[in-house]
């Protein structure tokens, strides 16, 4: 997965910040293997893992990505 996008620095700015999110082949393979294992353990859980990963990547696309844990079950201790 290679994801590229750009963000302007501010209104009328001619400078652009380009952020590239790159997932290595090994990491993508590990995600697929982990999702398959979780799916066998509990149907639907593997898909939730992949969705959570995709959500984390989308958070990086936000103009001001959160620097603290996102509220929800994963953020609870």
Image (cartoon, rainbow, N blue to C red):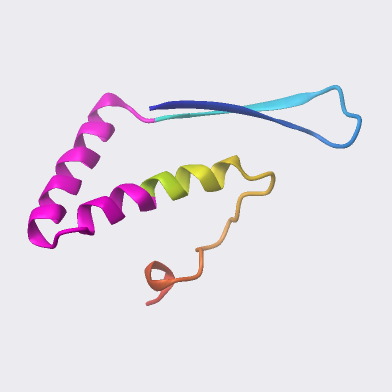
Left-right relation of 63 to 44: right
Residue 14: where, in percent of width, then height? 86, 22
Residue 49: where, in percent of width, then height? 29, 53
Q: Quadrant of the C terminus?
A: bottom left
At a point 27% along the width and 33% down the height, the residue shown is: 28
Q: Nearer the viewer, residue 24 or 55?
A: 55
Q: Nearer the viewer, residue 14 or 67?
A: 14
Against 66, is 58 above or below? above
Q: Is residue 38 magenta?
A: yes
Q: Nearer the viewer, residue 31 or 39?
A: 39
Left-right relation of 54 to 19: left
User: How many badges with numbers are in the image?
Assistant: 0
* Magenta span: 23-52
At a point 60% along the width and 28% down the height, the residue shown is: 5
Q: Nearer the viewer, residue 68 or 61?
A: 61
Q: Quadrant of the N terminus?
A: top left
Residue 9: where, in percent of width, then height? 80, 34
At a point 61% along the width and 49% down the height, the residue shown is: 65
At a point 63% along the width and 45% down the height, the residue shown is: 62
Against 45, is 60 above or below? above
Left-right relation of 19 to 13: left
Q: Residue furthest front?
A: 43
Q: Is residue 61 magenta?
A: no
Q: Residue furthest left?
A: 40
Residue 44: where, in percent of width, then height? 21, 58
Magenta part, dominant SS: helix
| Residue 74 occupies quadrant | bottom left
Against 25, is 63 above or below? below
Q: Residue furthest bottom?
A: 77
């Amino acid at each position: 997965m290679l994801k590229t996008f750009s963000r302007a620095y501010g209104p009328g700015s001619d400078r652009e910040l380009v952020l590239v999110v790159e997932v290595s082949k090994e990491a993508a393979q590990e995600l697929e293997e982990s999702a398959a294992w979780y799916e066998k353990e509990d149907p639907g859980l593997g898909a939730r893992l992949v969705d959570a990963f995709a959500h984390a990547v989308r958070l990086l696309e936000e103009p001001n990505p959160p620097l603290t844990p996102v509220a929800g079950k994963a953020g609870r201790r």
